[in-house]
Amino acid sequence: MTNGSTILVTGGAGFIGSHTCLALLDYGYEVVVVDNHDNSSPMALERVRKLAGRPLTAYDVDMRNRDALDGVFAAHPVEAVIHFAARKAVGESMRMPLAYYDTNVGGTATLLRVMAAYGVQKMIFSSSCSIYGNALRLPLDEDSPARPTNPYARSKWICEQLMADACVANPKLSVIALRYFNPIGAHPSGELGEDPKSVPNNLMPYLAQVAIGRLDKVTVFGADYPTPDGTCVRDYIHVVDLADGHRLAIEHLTDETGLRVLNLGTGVGVSVLELVTAFGEVCGTPLPHRIAARRPGDVPELVADSRRVERAWGWRTTRDIAVMCTDAWRFQQLNPTGYGS
Ligand SMILES: NC(=O)c1ccc[n+]([C@@H]2O[C@H](COP(=O)([O-])OP(=O)(O)OC[C@H]3O[C@@H](n4cnc5c(N)ncnc54)[C@H](O)[C@@H]3O)[C@@H](O)[C@H]2O)c1
């Protein structure tokens, strides 16, 4: 793939999508976004255009609307797709599993069918470390068994199998499923960041909203896990490192066909309480927190073995927890009510 190629980014207005669109524009790609703004603001894309100093075309389209997707592919010479659009809240997926299968699995199937109709053979898929579920051993490499513990994680696992089947049926198809660990942080400009539409389900935007005074205190779900301080341990990765991983993945789509699965993480485990403390240090005041019961669907520890992607592409992360907290806090301070939506 060369610079100047057109990349279709579904869910491009979202947290990871917006940072990735910026990385692609900075590398000279043309970017077309499809997003129904179920969990994002069009303002994020305005910011991407401003930071890149280049145009980006966006469509307010639902992934499940095949006719509308058709229209987008008909209007642009799409060479590859990065598929972020999905519902992503574990707790919500326990309450409304069908909505998760509909958007995440149905949306992916619809996308692959439209890609096939237009002869588009390259895709990068947002998969998740949640697929591993209750880890049998750590760190988790890509051959670790899939043991998803909630409908969200299962929807991602089903998508991986669906894409594997699609690759068997179409030997020209090249799909890279990137299993992200826990993306946090924000663009260093403070212009792009995570701005969930409702009360945050993820820890970092929750911390930031407590620090800015929008929420009272941090709720820590479970302090009786078999981890050093009893709280869940995750592998946090800076969203800009993650965006760069996608930019690199685009370059490697032509290496081979079929489905490839790669972890994107740092290999460093950080507990919930350690992250609460790290954020407090960055914003200059300890964050009040309370311990609550475990959340259904959560698992004690998820830490990546990312050696496969390092060996294959030479990719590794460069930003640590302090940078992740500093950048997220900058975004929150400059945008106390997020994108204002
Ligand atoms: N953030 C994480 O912790 C994490 C971890 C692992 C994997 N992922 C995956 O990465 C992807 C991006 O995550 P994110 O954190 O940027 O989430 P996000 O919610 O910020 O972005 C998702 C985007 O998809 C859009 N969208 C949702 N349903 C849609 C539909 N039916 N049609 C069109 N657009 C739709 C939303 O409006 C949003 O802009 C998701 O697939 C998610 O499952 C995220």
Image (cartoon, rainbow, N blue to C red):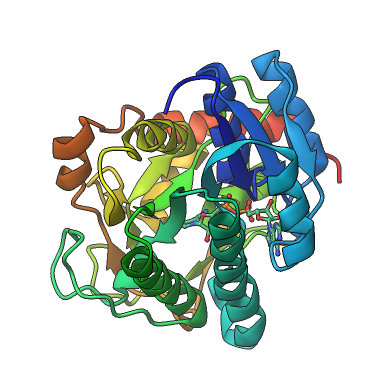
Residue 209, image x and y in percent? 68, 48
Picture residue at 56% right of the left edge, 53% below the top: 84
Q: In which quarter of the image is ligand 1?
A: bottom right
Report whether residue 284 is seen.
Answer: no
Residue 107, image x and y in percent? 62, 68
Residue 116, image x and y in percent? 53, 58
Compared with residue 185, is residue 134 higher up or lower down, i.e. above or below?
Answer: below
In the image, is 79 to the left or to the right of 268?
right
Compared with residue 252, is residue 151 higher up or lower down, i.e. above or below?
Answer: below
Residue 63, image x and y in percent? 69, 62
Picture residue at 63% right of the left edge, 58% below the top: 217
Picture residue at 38% right of the left edge, 62% below the top: 170
Compared with residue 75, is residue 180 higher up or lower down, i.e. above or below?
Answer: below
Closer to the camera in the image, 28 or 218: 28
Instruction: Check the picture and name the quadrant holding the N terminus.
Output: top left
Quarter of the image where one finds residue 160 = bottom left
